């Protein structure tokens, strides 16, 4: 299995070569030369596997330069009940991502049982172990530069804290995260963790990360790596829980392997749902893939009109589902690469228009194929929608969902086919968004044991301007060469 760039300017590389990096040297994203395939008979054999064995069966198809025994050991070390049990469903902890039944064909897949209570833990915990393994094998170190709108940062820091050969420099938008999200990140005191609070929105943070990655000399000198969803290691780990969610839903609804299941995914940077697209390309019988957004509805606009036109900071809104306060969806490039027949020159021209401050509109045939062949649909939500749907789910089903998952619930209802099971991918635990939950339910959300008083812990961070050169100088002062 070799990896190429979506923009066609990089020679094929192995998994370990692209694992530590973010953007490819030509500015594109890494993607497999082809997707491994599972026939229906093979899927049936996977259906009863536990999460660890299923993860190995899927991920090993993408990795051929790490010995199988070592890869299996890393996966087994990662996906344990001890790591993925926050006290919510202790009896189901070994399932890692159990599904919650709302009605006969509507389910929520728990993805927030990891240490930071967000779906990002599903991939980030494995990425931390892979990084440590590959760095030890190469005798190298890496300095991770990342950007977060709320959950990626804490998931990365908890996965990388104390890891040998790894430093983490995480950019987050100043004052734009929930108090819980800030406390999760800023209260960490590990010497290899640095938090930079950037004056601006997430898109400004993400732009800085991309600008630094484009400086090839600086990136090489300071050994800059990435853990944002542009990192392929995260995407491939996320593919696994689509398989697990599919099999769990098929079993719960009495259907057979080969029958379709729809998935609805709250999405800002398009990484989570990109993993669903890849699972579908591998042969998993996914019908619809529904993108849920908030008021920052660039993705909703794209899937409804075929026009992708990222917006500036003046049209980026601070919302109550803050992890999706994003108007430049980096991983969309991977999907569009497939959509345009893997034509790297065509893709590069489209993204050159985006990076020049504009955008693009899909030709009619590509737009039709996106909906009819790839099964994508979308829906946007407002704060009022979130509050109403948090109340509705709690009143009807006795289940508390966070604001992002509420965005997903609205989108699922809008595009639901009663004949096909629908799985809403959970984003985070409600405890991370107490203010909105109090407004919706007039009661504080349940908080896992051990996290009481988190916001009262001492916090450590540095405020910085939204300027790539200032960030580069900050890193240069602290990285030991």
Image: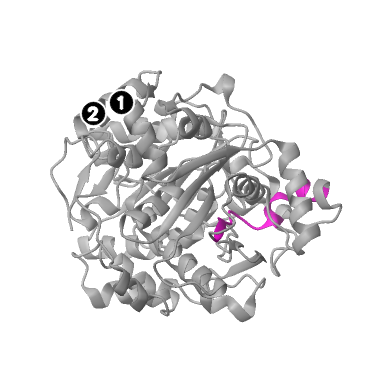
Residue at x 53%, y 57% (from the top left corner) = 119
Asked whether disc 1 touches disc 2, contact meaning CB atoms under 8 Å apart, the reply is: yes
Residue nearer the viewer, 295 or 163: 295
Q: Position of residue 328 (x, y in %)?
A: 46, 31
Question: Is 424 within the magenta?
Answer: yes
Q: Residues within 10 Å of mark 2 (few under 14, many from 20)?
A: some
| Residue 415 in sight from this viewpoint | yes
Cα–Cα span, label 1 and label 2:
6 Å
- The residue positioned farthest toward the right in the image shown: 442
Identify the element where label 2 is drawn. helix
Please provide the residue range marked out in magenta: 421-438
Disc 1 secondary structure class: helix
Question: Which mark, residue 126?
Answer: none
Res. 171 in view:
no
Residue 459 at x, y percent in the picture: 64, 49
Whether residue 99 is in magenta: the answer is no
Seen at 44% across and 36% down, the residue is: 329
Which quarter shows the N terminus?
Answer: bottom left
97 lies left or right of 397? left
- Which residue does the image show at 81% across and 48% down from the upper left? 440
Residue drawn at (38%, 34%), measured in percent from left and top? 368
Location of residue 297 in the rendering, given as x and y in whole percent from the top left corner: 56, 32
Mark 1, residue position: 350
Q: Nearer the viewer, residue 361 or 235?
A: 361
Q: Which mark is residue 346?
A: 2
Q: Nearer the viewer, residue 474 or 412?
A: 412
Residue density around tag 1, few if under 14, some if 14–19, many if 20 or more, within 10 Å? some
Find residue 85 and report its horizontal and vertical position in percent. 59, 73
Q: Is residue 307 above or below residue 101?
A: above
- In this figure, which colouring scheme has been used for the structure? one colour
């Amino acid at each position: 299995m070799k990896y190429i760039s979506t923009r066609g300017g990089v020679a094929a590389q192995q998994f370990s070569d692209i694992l530590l990096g973010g953007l490819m040297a030509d500015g594109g994203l890494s993607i497999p030369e082809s997707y491994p395939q599972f026939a229906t008979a093979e899927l049936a054999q996977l259906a009863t596997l536990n999460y660890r064995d299923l993860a190995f069966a899927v991920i090993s198809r993408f990795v051929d330069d790490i010995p199988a025994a070592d890869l299996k050991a890393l996966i087994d070390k990662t996906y344990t009940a001890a790591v993925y049990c926050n006290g919510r469903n202790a009896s189901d902890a070994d399932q890692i991502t159990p599904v919650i039944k709302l009605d006969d064909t509507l389910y929520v897949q728990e993805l927030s049982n990891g240490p930071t209570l967000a779906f990002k833990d599903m991939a980030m915990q494995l990425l931390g172990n892979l990084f440590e393994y590959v760095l030890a094998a190469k005798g190298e170190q890496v300095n991770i530069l990342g950007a977060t709108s709320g959950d990626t940062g804490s998931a990365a820091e908890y996965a990388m804290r104390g890891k040998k050969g790894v430093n983490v420099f995480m950019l987050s938008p100043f004052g734009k995260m929930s108090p819980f999200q800030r406390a999760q990140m800023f209260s960490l005191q590990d010497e290899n963790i640095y938090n930079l609070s950037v004056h601006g929105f997430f898109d400004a943070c993400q732009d800085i990360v991309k600008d630094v990655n484009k400086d090839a000399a600086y990136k090489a000198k300071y050994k800059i790596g990435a853990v944002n969803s542009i990192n392929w290691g995260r995407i491939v780990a996320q593919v696994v829980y689509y398989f697990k969610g599919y099999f769990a839903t098929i079993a719960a609804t009495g259907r057979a392997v080969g029958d379709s299941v729809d998935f609805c995914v709250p999405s800002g940077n398009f990484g989570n749902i990109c993993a669903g697209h890849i699972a579908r390309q591998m042969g998993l019988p996914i019908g619809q893939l529904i993108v849920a957004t908030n008021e920052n509805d660039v993705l909703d606009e794209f899937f409804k009109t075929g026009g992708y036109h990222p917006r500036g900071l003046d049209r980026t809104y601070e919302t109550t589902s803050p992890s999706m306060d994003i108007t430049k969806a980096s991983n969309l490039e991977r999907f569009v690469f497939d959509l345009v027949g893997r034509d790297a020159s065509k893709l590069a021209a489209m993204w050159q228009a985006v990076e020049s401050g504009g955008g693009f509109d899909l030709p009619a045939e590509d737009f039709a194929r996106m909906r009819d062949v790839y099964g994508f649909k979308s829906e946007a939500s407002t704060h009022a929608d979130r509050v109403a749907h948090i109340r509705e789910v709690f009143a009807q089903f006795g289940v508390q969902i966070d604001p992002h998952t509420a965005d997903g619930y609205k989108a699922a209802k809008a595009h639901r086919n009663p004949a096909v099971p629908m799985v809403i991918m959970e984003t985070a635990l409600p405890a991370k968004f107490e203010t909105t939950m109090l407004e919706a339910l007039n009661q504080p959300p349940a908080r896992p044991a051990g996290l009481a008083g988190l916001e009262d812990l001492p916090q450590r961070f540095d405020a910085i301007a939204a300027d790539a050169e200032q960030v580069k100088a900050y890193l240069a002062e602290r990285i030991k060469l």
